[in-house]
Image (spheres, rainbow, N blue to C red):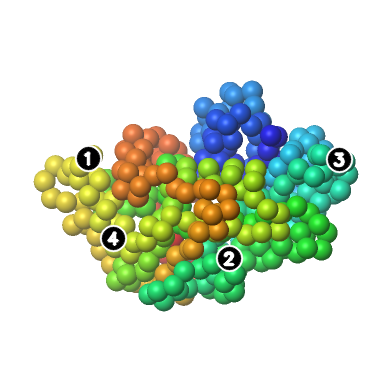
Amino acid sequence: MKVLMTGGMGFIGSAVVRRCLADGHSVVNVDKVTYAASEETLATEAINPLYGWIQADICDAEIMNSVFKNARPDAVLHLAAETHVDRSIGEPAAFITTNIVGTYSLLEAAHAYWAGLLGAEKDEFRFLHVSTDEVYGSLGAEGLFTEKTAYTPNSPYAASKASADHLVRSWNRTYGLPAIITNCSNNFGPFQFPEKLIPVIIMKARNGEPIPIYGDGSNVREWLFVDDHAEALLQVVRNGKTGETYNVGSSDELTNLDVARRVCEALDDLEPRLDGASHADRITFVDDRPGHDFRYALDASKIANELGWQPRHSLDEALRETVRWYIENETWCTNIMDGNYRGERLGLAHGLAGGN
């Protein structure tokens, strides 16, 4: 399979690139390389003859048309996006541009390319748009988001992704583009940019700094290991039904405070403090994020029943693997943060660390 990937140097995108190459698929990666992306993330993959990279903005229609013409993909995996909720609160314009206008530009290029295909090439082409559970809004203490849940986005980030989802669905219904949407729960794992909750906890703890948790730490998220997500996306693009949406989740729900405590437990084992105290002693509570959704949780029975996908990693196993990776890859963390992000808090209307 020839895959056109957008955002392949980002956190989830790079995991999908690695999965594609491991499965023998060729990949052309289109990435603008914004602050949260780095060529170092795919340094090993860069020498693979199945891998190619084009530095470009998906909003550039002319370049996107050229990419399709030259790459002639069998499938598009669209992951390019601005993703951090906190950053969207203070800097929403970039989210509107990349997530909405960029998706529109890519859809137009994909549709023009697909319309010109013939026979089996046209029948087998797929456009997979990777989205988030945040488009559904917020849950109370009980219940799950299903693929039929009405959209109620509550942050600029969520609204931009919801808009992109609607565009993809309309290009499928109106123009027949064979598109599929996935909505995933919170991802974690190696190579995640250090503005997100789990990397923030690891790096603050290792630096001997206070570990900031929003509010009282009771907000609940469902946590999905990024390698499991990558496998799910390949399963969907190969075997998913066009025009459908698939929720991709793990059923592993934790409060933000519990996440911090579990990460600290792993750190206590892998890199104990010299004074013998627990890293969890550094957990502190800071003012909550504006409009902070209380709980996200997905019903992922559809992808399990129809496509046979389930996550392979246990939460504790994956958290421990993630903590170990950050300990062993300090250089990557230092390099990607250089000049872009210093662990400061983001998320207030006028600029604030560590929300998902």
Q: Determine the residue positioned at 37% across, 61% down.
A: 253
Q: CA distance from mark 2 to mark 4?
A: 27 Å
Q: Quadrant of the C terminus?
A: bottom left
Task: Tell me which amino acid carries mark 3.
Answer: Gly
Q: CA distance from mark 4 to mark 3?
A: 52 Å
Q: Residues within 10 Å of mark 4 (few under 14, many from 20)?
A: some
Q: Is the Cβ of the residue at disc 2 closer than 8 Å to that at disc 4?
A: no
Q: Nearer the viewer, residue 124 or 192?
A: 124
Identify the residue under disc 2.
147
Q: Is the Cβ of the residue at disc 4 closer than 8 Å to that at disc 3?
A: no
Numbered circle sitting on residue 313: none
Identify the residue under disc 4.
258
Q: Quadrant of the N terminus?
A: top right
Foreground label between 3 and 1:
3
Q: Earlier along the polypeptide chain: callout 4 or callout 1?
A: 4
Q: CA distance from mark 3 to mark 1?
A: 57 Å
Residue 353 in view of the camera: no
Q: Determine the residue positioned at 29% across, 71% down.
A: 216
Numbered circle sitting on residue 119: 3
Identify the residue under disc 1.
271
